[in-house]
Image (cartoon, helix red, strand yellow):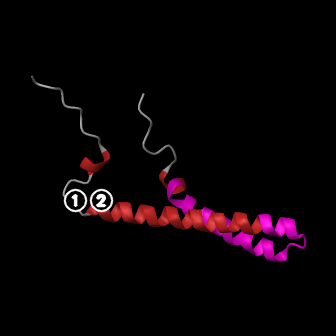
């Protein structure tokens, strides 16, 4: 059984990095507003992780799409070549 290439619908898939970024910013803001040092530290780490994760996903998708657009047949990049059998 082959795994599907995109298990989520396109709007959800495209919106996930932005969701991570928004949640990261919200967690960073919450870390400044929290009184408890421990909760503030946890919220800050979660916020930085969300910002970093969203940024990495956005940049990797951009680079992949740019690389794919440079080829004449972009669909040939997504399929793996069939294994060749020895003809001896």
Q: Secondary structure at mark 2?
A: helix
Specify the segment rendered in magenta.
Answer: 13-42
Say whether residue 24 is magenta: yes
Seen in the picture, residue 4 relative to 72 is either above or below; the reply is: above
Question: Which quarter of the image is occupied by the N terminus?
Answer: top left
In this picture, residue 47 sits left or right of residue 19: right
Q: What secondary structure is the magenta-colored segment mainly?
A: helix
In the depicted view, which residue is nearer to us: 12 or 24?
Answer: 24
Residue lying furthest front in this view? 88
Residue lying furthest left in this view? 88
Q: Quadrant of residue 32?
A: bottom right
Residue drawn at the location 56% of the way across and 58% of the way down? 16
Residue drawn at the location 49% of the way across and 65% of the way down? 58
Residue drawn at the location 28% of the way across and 50% of the way down? 77
Q: Secondary structure at mark 1?
A: loop
Residue 71's disc number: 1
Residues marked 2 and 1 touching at CB (< 8 Å): yes
Residue 68's disc number: 2
Seen in the picture, residue 84 relative to 41 is either above or below; the reply is: above
- Coordinates of residue 86 in the picture (x, y in percent): 15, 26
Residue drawn at the location 24% of the way across and 63% of the way down? 70
Residue lying furthest right in this view? 35
Say whether residue 76 is magenta: no
In this picture, residue 24 sits left or right of residue 16: right
- Coordinates of residue 9 in the picture (x, y in percent): 50, 49
Residue lying furthest top in this view? 88
In this picture, residue 64 sits left or right of residue 44: left
- Coordinates of residue 37 in the picture (x, y in percent): 87, 70
């Amino acid at each position: 059984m082959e795994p599907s290439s995109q298990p989520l619908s396109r709007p959800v898939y495209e919106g996930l990095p932005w969701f991570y970024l928004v949640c990261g910013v919200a967690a960073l803001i919450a870390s400044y507003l929290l009184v408890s040092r421990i909760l503030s530290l946890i919220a800050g780490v979660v916020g930085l992780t969300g910002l970093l994760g969203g940024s990495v996903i956005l940049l990797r998708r951009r680079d992949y799409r740019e690389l794919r657009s440079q080829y004449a047949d972009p669909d040939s990049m997504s399929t793996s070549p069939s294994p060749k059998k020895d003809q001896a």
